[in-house]
């Protein structure tokens, strides 16, 4: 596995890779969820490129940029074990050179849900993804379903800007108790960790109701609110049942929907989601 740190080195390394090329962008703190993306990329492509970059543009002031988990030596070991051929691990100046002023605005999709709580977050995501796609020139790029809004935004970005990358969205990987794997889980105290599966319990209630014939979106949102309210350590930021194309809230689930929620614990904030239909 080759580790490269700047744009020129990445361009040289990329030129030697046989296609098709799969790409797994990450912020690091690699866990089994990332490894599942890497294995999928390895199975479906001749070459695999991964990135390791904590992108400052997607963090607002006061968020957890400084405390975001970082373990580059451990991450590189896990990238190698999962079959990556090249890892792009730049510093900020290699991604955003001096004088950088361009950003990618994803419009209404980036202003709701996570975008309403974290203004500018998806502008940062879309900007770095566009840069990375331009540098890596992948045939396929792999994202996890847990970040459902992000996956939808990247799919729209690729379509709108004609980037000719196949976006592959892979199932969420979970702990035995159902908690979605996340790099931020390390911040949970033992008591919070025991409480955290309340997110997946809320989604499970929605899934069960939907399978039983419930189509009233507000009733499904209310099931989330009730379940989260049952956990004293959990504070609900939003509960959403939205159209999977527009991310606008539905009244009736009569087409593809994304159920999502964000929950704050005293030490950190977690998200999860469930596609319907």
Image: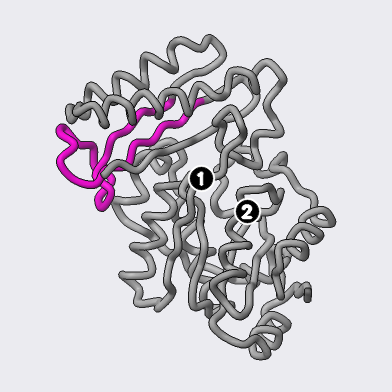
Mark 1 crowd level (few <14, some 14–19, many ≥20, 10 Å Cα): many
Percent x, y for residue 210? 26, 30
Work out whether residue 205 or residue 101 is closer to the camera in this orientation and state it.
205
Q: Quadrant of the N terminus?
A: bottom right
Counting residues from the N terminus, which is met first, the one under dot 1 or under dot 2? 2
Q: Do the residues under discs 1 and 2 have CB atoms within 8 angstroms?
A: no
Callout 1 secondary element: loop
Percent x, y for residue 209? 28, 25
Residue plotted at (71% across, 21% down): 189
Residue plotted at (66% across, 48% down): 32
Residue 73 appears in which quarter of the rendering? Answer: bottom right
Horizontally, residue 96 falls left or right of residue 84, namely: left
**Residue marked by disc 2:** 34
Relative to 129, is 277 above or below? above
Q: CA distance from mark 1 to mark 2?
A: 10 Å
Horizontally, residue 47 falls left or right of residue 4, namely: left
Q: Is residue 267 magenta?
A: no
Relative to 82, is 191 above or below? above
Callout 2 secondary element: helix
Residues shaded magenta: 237-263
Q: Is residue 248 magenta?
A: yes
Q: Quadrant of the C terminus?
A: top left
Mark 2 crowd level (few <14, some 14–19, many ≥20, 10 Å Cα): many
The disc at residue 255 is none
> Number of marks in the image?
2
Q: Residue furthest right?
A: 73
Residue plotted at (45% across, 63% down): 168
Residue plotted at (71% across, 62% down): 82
Residue 67 appears in which quarter of the rendering? Answer: top right
**Residue marked by disc 1:** 172
Percent x, y for residue 246? 25, 50
């Amino acid at each position: 596995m080759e580790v490269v740190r700047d744009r020129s080195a990445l361009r040289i390394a990329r030129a030697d890779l046989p296609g098709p090329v799969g790409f797994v962008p990450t912020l690091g703190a690699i866990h089994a969820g990332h490894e599942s993306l890497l294995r999928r990329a390895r199975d479906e492509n001749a070459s695999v490129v991964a990135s390791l970059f904590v992108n400052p543009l997607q963090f607002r002031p006061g968020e957890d940029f400084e405390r975001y988990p970082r373990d580059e030596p451990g991450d590189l070991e896990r990238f190698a074990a999962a079959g990556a051929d090249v890892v792009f691990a730049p510093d900020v100046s290699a991604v955003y050179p001096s004088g950088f002023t361009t950003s990618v605005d994803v419009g209404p999709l980036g202003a709701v849900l996570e975008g309403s709580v974290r203004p500018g977050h998806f502008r940062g995501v879309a900007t770095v993804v566009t840069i990375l796609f331009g540098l890596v020139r992948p045939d396929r790029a792999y994202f996890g379903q847990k970040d459902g809004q992000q996956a939808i935004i990247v799919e729209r970005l690729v379509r709108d800007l004609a980037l000719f990358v196949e976006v592959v969205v892979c199932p969420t990987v979970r702990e035995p108790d159902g908690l979605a794997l996340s790099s931020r889980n390390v911040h949970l105290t033992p008591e919070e960790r025991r409480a955290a599966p309340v997110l997946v319990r809320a989604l499970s209630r929605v899934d069960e109701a939907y399978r039983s014939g419930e189509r009233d979106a507000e009733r499904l949102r209310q099931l989330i609110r009730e379940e989260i309210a049952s956990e004293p350590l959990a504070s609900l930021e939003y509960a959403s049942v939205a159209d999977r194309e527009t991310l606008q809230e539905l009244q009736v689930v009569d087409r593809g929907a994304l159920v999502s929620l964000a929950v704050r614990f005293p030490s950190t904030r977690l998200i999860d989601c469930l596609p319907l239909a």
